[in-house]
Structure formats: structure tokens, C-alpha cells
Image (cartoon, coloured by chain):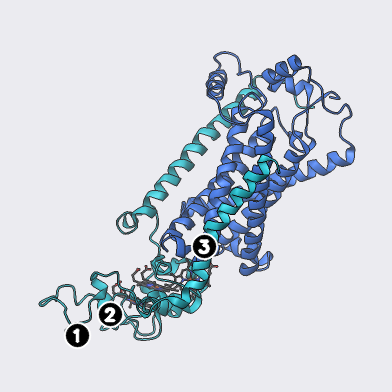
């Protein structure tokens, strides 16, 4: 064997060793996870309390005393539309026009209820809501996306408009990616369309010999 | 115009043809997805057999494009290994390109002579690299979105939002660039109108060579390689075929460009 062939096999062998190991762990690993890991398939806590991990009024054990601020936020209600007048009989888009623009709605042709469920529609952060980030992956996404994990559920269904100030607040990485791409687009197109235009004009005026 | 200079190898021409076909397919199927809630987009979608079909065409052709890219990359590496990385045949940017651009800009406003371009002009190099970097971005983000659950095991789910934005923005940029600027340079500008066929025939008429790429002509003369192209001009059949191909591609491209610009006027980079 010449040297090139040996190097080739060494590299391929190394790659196989590394990825074979990772693959094996992934394929075989599921059988051996302990019960506490398996729980994470359905419910997940990041290990510290966030606002959506608080049980509704009075039901929380170990919930800080006097923690009532923000409790009457619609996002924490079991019925997000509780007490809203003229709710019945109207279409969701009538009151939530921005939410209708999601890719799932526009491209996937899903209805709101395929994710948000039937009445009552729970607030996103209600402790028992299927939409609660603790369990959204298992109770909502995984119904259609087989194998969806907690990471998958952090995908923003109702993506804010990337260029908006709202996105800057709630999804900065999206906002700055947008800025970068917009800058790139304007820069490249600006420079080269000007260049093309001037070149075209110059060629026109210098009356070059026409193409045969 | 019988004397010609060989400019593109058969594999270059094949890659370009393959890229033309896959790019146009991706442009049509992608734009149909972006505009599917407009009358134009929904008609287009319907004509192509519906959303699901269009998505799977987009996926399959995308994979083909990826393979084309990989093969091209391997092929180029081999060729570069043989002929050297830098030097006047190379597509890599060098300071000379910047100087050429400066000279040409001066020439355009009427100050001094045009740049003496070599084998690849600076804008041809930019065309090449723009596509070269665009393809992996589109391929990676496209694969992420198509296999979103699998992707979310390696990256957080919210990066799929970003992947979607990158895929869309890069594609819009590529479409406007290719259909607007690349087509203008290859077909519309006075010295190329109605079409510069060298990417199809692989040959460049000597008269054009001296005019457009004087530095390259000089170099070829020094190496004794000038006029190494075919002496015959292309057969009428071949001429008809490539003219039709080129003109069709430009027509489709300009049509799509109009709708891309309308879309971007309405939505910007968000979809």
C-alpha cells in the first residue's frame, strides 16, 4: 500500500470510531435510561422555577408565600378567554390576527385548535396547560412530530416579524440575524447592480464592436 | 469568428448546466412556497401539483444540488492541486481584483482606460463565490428544516426559526442576484447581448478574448496556448439548442425576478 492509501484508511477508521461510538450510544442508549430521565420525555423542569412552573392560585406546595403578583394574567388562566365578551362564535383570527401568520397555519394548513385544543383554551403558562413549556413537546408537538423533545418545542410557532422591535425584545438572535442578512442583501445588490448599470452604460457609449 | 479560445472544460459546462436546472427548479418551487397565499403563488402551486408535491420536489432537487456541489468541490480541489492554488487561472480573489475594480470604476466615469482583465474578471469570481457560499448555507438550513425533529437533538429548537430566516433570506438574495445581475452580465449588457454562449460551447471567440480579457490573451500568447479551441464553429443544431436553453432560462428568471421583488416589497425578508 502506498502512503496515500494508508492515510486514507487511517482517517476513515478514525471517523468511524468516533461516530460509531456516538451512534451506538444513541441507538442502544434508550433502553438503559433511568426512570428519572424517562420522566423528561413528558415533563421537564430546568431545575429552577420560572413563572410558568408556578401552580395556579393557592395550589402550589412550596410556592413562595404572598406570591400573587401576576397571578391574574390571562396566560395563567385555565380558560384564557374567561369573561371576555363576544368571544363565542368569532374566529380566532379576528382577535389574534398576527398568530394566523404562522408557518403551521399558512403552509401546514393547520387550524388553531389542532394545537391549542378545544374549549376552554388554556393560557400558555397555566400550570396544567398542555402548552406549558414544561410539557409542550410531549403533549402538543409530539402528536404530529414523532420524537419531538424539549429542545424541539422551543421552536417559536408564532415567530415575531424578524425586523420588528418586538423581535428585538423577545427573540434577539432572530432580530440580529435579520439585520445581518438585510445588510448583506442591500450591500451586495447595491454594489453590484450599480456596477452592472454603469458597465452597461459605459459599453453602450463606447460603441464596442457588437457581438458576432 | 472561427478562431476560438478554449475557456471552459466539459465538466465546467456540465456543472453550470446542472446548476442552471436545479437552481431554476428550486427558485420556482421555493417562491411558490413563499407566495402560496397570493393568487399568483397559489395558481403556480396548483399547476405544479400542490403543496406536498412541490415540497418534495424542492427537497429532492435540493439534495441533487448538494451532491452537485460536493462533486464540484472535489473536482475543483483535484484540479487546484494539479494547477496550483493561486496564479492567473485561479478563481481565488487576489488584490489584483480589487485594483481591477477600482480601475474599472474610474473607467466607467470616464477617467482612464478599462482594467486589463485576466481569465476571470472580478465580477465573475464574485458570481462564483457568492453561489459557492450560498449553497452550503441553503443546504444546511434546508436539511435542518426538513428534518426538524432530528436537528433539534443537536441544536436548540429555536435555531430552526433562525435557520428558516437564513434559508429564505439567502434564497431571496441568490434569486435577485442571479436573475438580476448575473443575467445582466451574461446576456443583457451591450457586449454580451443577446447571449454570451461561451459557458455552453466552452469556447470564446478570439476577437472577444482580446477585447474583454487582454491580460489573459497576452498570457496565453506567451505560453503558446492561444487559439487552442476548436476551429469549427458550433453546429446549427447545437447553436439552436443552447440559444433556446439560455433564452428560456433568462425568460423564466426574469419572470421570477418580478415576483421575487413584489414579494420582497410586501414581506421584506420575513415570510
**Measured Cα–Cα span from mark 3 to mark 1:** 46 Å
Check the rendered structure and report the hue given to chain A: cyan
Looking at the rendered image, the disc whose residue lies closer to the viewer, 3 or 2, is 3
Residue A128 located left or right of residue B38: left
Element type at mark 1: loop
The part of the image, by quadrant, that contains residue A89 is: bottom left
For mark 3, name the chain. Answer: A
Q: Residue at x 52, y 21 (%)?
A: B102
Element type at mark 2: loop
Q: Is residue A47 found left or right of B214 in the rendered image? A: left
Circle 1 sits on which residue? A59
Q: Residue furthest front?
A: A1
Q: Which mark is residue A127?
A: 2
Task: Tell which of B99 and B34 is nearer to you.
Answer: B99
Task: Please indicate, yes or no, whether residue A149 appears anywhere in the rendered image.
Answer: yes
The x and y percentages for residue B31 are 58, 56
Tell me if residue B92 comes above or below residue A104 in the rendering. above
CB within 8 Å, label 2 to label 1 = yes
Residue in the foreground of this view, choosing between A34 and A212: A34
Residue A21, numbered circle: 3
Q: Chain of mark 2?
A: A
Give me the C-alpha separation between circle 2 and circle 1: 10 Å
Q: Residue at x 81, y 22 (%)?
A: B227
Amino acid at each position: 500500500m502506498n502512503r496515500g492509501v494508508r492515510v486514507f484508511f487511517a482517517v476513515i477508521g478514525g471517523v468511524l470510531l468516533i461516530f460509531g461510538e456516538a451512534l451506538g450510544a444513541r441507538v442502544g442508549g434508550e433502553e438503559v435510561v433511568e426512570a428519572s430521565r424517562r420522566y423528561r420525555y413528558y415533563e421537564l423542569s430546568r431545575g429552577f422555577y420560572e413563572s410558568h412552573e408556578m401552580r395556579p392560585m393557592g395550589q402550589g406546595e412550596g410556592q413562595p408565600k404572598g406570591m400573587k403578583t401576576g397571578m391574574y394574567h390571562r396566560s395563567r388562566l385555565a380558560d384564557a378567554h374567561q369573561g371576555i365578551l363576544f368571544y363565542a362564535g368569532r374566529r380566532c383570527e379576528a382577535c389574534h390576527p398576527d398568530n394566523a401568520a404562522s408557518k403551521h397555519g399558512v403552509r401546514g394548513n393547520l387550524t388553531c385548535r389542532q394545537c391549542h385544543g378545544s374549549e376552554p383554551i388554556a393560557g400558555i403558562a397555566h400550570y396544567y396547560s398542555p402548552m406549558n413549556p414544561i410539557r409542550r413537546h410531549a403533549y402538543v408537538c409530539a402528536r404530529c412530530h414523532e420524537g419531538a423533545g424539549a429542545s424541539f418545542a422551543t421552536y417559536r410557532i408564532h415567530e415575531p416579524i424578524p425586523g420588528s422591535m418586538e423581535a428585538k425584545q423577545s427573540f434577539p438572535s432572530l432580530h440580529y440575524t435579520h439585520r445581518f442578512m438585510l445588510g448583506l442583501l442591500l450591500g451586495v445588490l447595491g454594489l453590484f447592480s450599480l456596477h452592472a448599470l454603469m458597465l452597461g452604460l459605459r459599453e453602450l457609449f463606447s460603441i464596442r464592436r457588437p457581438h458576432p | 469568428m472561427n478562431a476560438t479560445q478554449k475557456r471552459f472544460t466539459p465538466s465546467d459546462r456540465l456543472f453550470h448546466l446542472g446548476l442552471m436546472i436545479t437552481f431554476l427548479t428550486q427558485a420556482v418551487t421555493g417562491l411558490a412556497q413563499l407566495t402560496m397565499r397570493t393568487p399568483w403563488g397559489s395558481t403556480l402551486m396548483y399547476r405544479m401539483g400542490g403543496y406536498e408535491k412541490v415540497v418534495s420536489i424542492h427537497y429532492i432537487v435540493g439534495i441533487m444540488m448538494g451532491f452537485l456541489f460536493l462533486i464540484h468541490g472535489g473536482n475543483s480541489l483535484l484540479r487546484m492541486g494539479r494547477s496550483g492554488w493561486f496564479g492567473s487561472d485561479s478563481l481565488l480573489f487576489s488584490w489584483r481584483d480589487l485594483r481591477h475594480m477600482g480601475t474599472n470604476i474610474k473607467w466607467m466615469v470616464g477617467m482612464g482606460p478599462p482594467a486589463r482583465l485576466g481569465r476571470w474578471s472580478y465580477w465573475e469570481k464574485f458570481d462564483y463565490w457568492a453561489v459557492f457560499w450560498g449553497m452550503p448555507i441553503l443546504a444546511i438550513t434546508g436539511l435542518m428544516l426538513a428534518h426538524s425533529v432530528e436537528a433539534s437533538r443537536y441544536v436548540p429548537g429555536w435555531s430552526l426559526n433562525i435557520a428558516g430566516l437564513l434559508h429564505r433570506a439567502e434564497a431571496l438574495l441568490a434569486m435577485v442576484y442571479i436573475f438580476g445581475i448575473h443575467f445582466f452580465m451574461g446576456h443583457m449588457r451591450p457586449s454580451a447581448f443577446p447571449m454570451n454562449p461561451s459557458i455552453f460551447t466552452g469556447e470564446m471567440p478570439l476577437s472577444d478574448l482580446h477585447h474583454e480579457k487582454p491580460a489573459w490573451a497576452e498570457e496565453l500568447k506567451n505560453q503558446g496556448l492561444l487559439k487552442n479551441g476548436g476551429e469549427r464553429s458550433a453546429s446549427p443544431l447545437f447553436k439552436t439548442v443552447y440559444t433556446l436553453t439560455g433564452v428560456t432560462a433568462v425568460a423564466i428568471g426574469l419572470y421570477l425576478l418580478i415576483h421575487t421583488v413584489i414579494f420582497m416589497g410586501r414581506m421584506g425578508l420575513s415570510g
